Amino acid sequence: MSLSLNSLLKVFKLLHIVGLMGLAILFATDLGQTVNGMVVISSLLGLGGVMISPFPVAIFIQWASDSKQKDL
């Protein structure tokens, strides 16, 4: 289970970085200055927030399993 959890965390971290870079590109263009662009950016932020919500849970599970192994 530890191997799959570590690979899941790597995927989440990679997607997080890619999403941040994508939003930076969207903010740097003129798309964010129009109403349609604002709707796109806010929708992407909301969707990203929903998609990343399991990430803190996965980090907690990794921390708990690591501390359990250290106690043994």
Image (cartoon, rainbow, N blue to C red):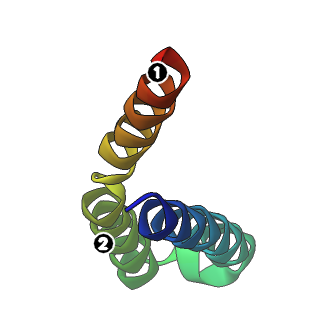
Residue name at image x 38 percent, y 80 percent = 40
Image check: 70 left or right of 8?
A: right
Q: Find residue 52 and report its horizontal and vertical position in percent.
A: 36, 58
Task: Please state which of residues 60 and 13 is positioned toward the viewer in this rendering.
Answer: 60
Q: Find residue 28 and report its horizontal and vertical position in percent.
A: 75, 72
Residue for badge 1: 72
- Quadrant location of residue 31? bottom right
Task: Please state which of residues 2 and 39 is positioned toward the viewer in this rendering.
Answer: 2
- Quadrant location of residue 39? bottom left
Residue for badge 2: 43
Q: Find residue 11 and report its horizontal and vertical position in percent.
A: 54, 73
Task: Please state which of residues 46 and 60 is positioned toward the viewer in this rendering.
Answer: 60
Q: Secondary structure at mark 1?
A: loop
Task: Please state which of residues 17 and 27 is positioned toward the viewer in this rendering.
Answer: 17
**Mark 1, other Cα within 10 Å: few <14 / some 14–19 / many ≥20:** few
Distance of mark 2 from mark 1, alpha carbons?
Answer: 46 Å
**Residue type, numbered disc 2:** Ser
Camera-nearest label, 2 or 1: 1
**Mark 2, other Cα within 10 Å: few <14 / some 14–19 / many ≥20:** few
Residue name at image x 46 percent, y 68 percent = 8
Residue name at image x 64 percent, y 77 percent = 22
- Quadrant location of residue 45? bottom left
Sequence-earlier tag: 2 or 1: 2
Q: Secondary structure at mark 2?
A: helix
**Residue type, numbered disc 1:** Leu
Total numbered labels placed on residues in the image = 2
